[in-house]
Image (cartoon, rainbow, N blue to C red):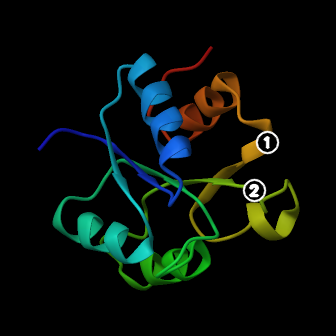
Amino acid sequence: MEDYVLVVDDDPNVTTLVVDALSLFGLNAQFAVNGVDALKQIEQNPPKAIVLDLMMPGMDGFTTITRLQRNATIRHIPIIILSGIADASEQIKNLPGVVGVIRKGDFSIARLSLLLGQAGMLFTH
């Protein structure tokens, strides 16, 4: 299967925004509505990067990160946090696997591009 970025968010408007932004960069995207669905997809076909919300029903982003880190074959996948409760605090940035944080109210294509570059998905200048 092709390389892709997994977008994990329970808000369909946010998912559409991020998937559309990823397509502008020529990246394939898939989505999941919570951590449970995300982990199922990841185990079947690991993505090259994950854009992850923190507050979702079923399984939140914090638990999803913990579960990802328990599995040696998928713990290396870079994670970009995209959440309304996220900020640039060291506590969020230092979660295992997190390459960066975007606050939903401050979403920008430029910031997503920068973090995708840090995740090894894009070549940035």
Horizontal placement of 28 versus 120: left or right? left
- Apparent side of residue 44 relative to residue 111 in the rendered image (left or right): left
Picture coordinates of residue 33, whole percent (x, y): 42, 63
Of all residues shown, which one is farthest toward the left? 1
CB contact under 8 Å: marks 2 and 1: yes
Hey, which residue is sitting farthest top in the picture? 125
Front residue of 28/73: it is: 28
Q: What residue appears at the point 50 percent right and 21 percent down from the top-left corner?
A: 123
- Amino acid at the residue labelled 1: Gly
The residue indicated by pointer 2 is: 84
- Residue at left offset 30%, top offset 33%: 28
Quadrant of the drawing holding the C terminus: top right
Say which amino acid is labelled 2.
Gly
| Alpha-carbon span between mark 2 and mark 1 | 7 Å
Q: Quadrant of residue 113?
A: top right
Hey, which quadrant is residue 111 in on the image? top right
Asked if one can make out residue 103 in the rendered structure from this viewpoint, the answer is: no
Instruction: Give whichever of 50, 59 is nearer the camera.
Output: 59
The residue tagged 1 is 105
Residue at coordinates 19% horizontally, 59% vertically from top-left?
Answer: 45
- Identify the residue at image location x=68%, y=49%: 100
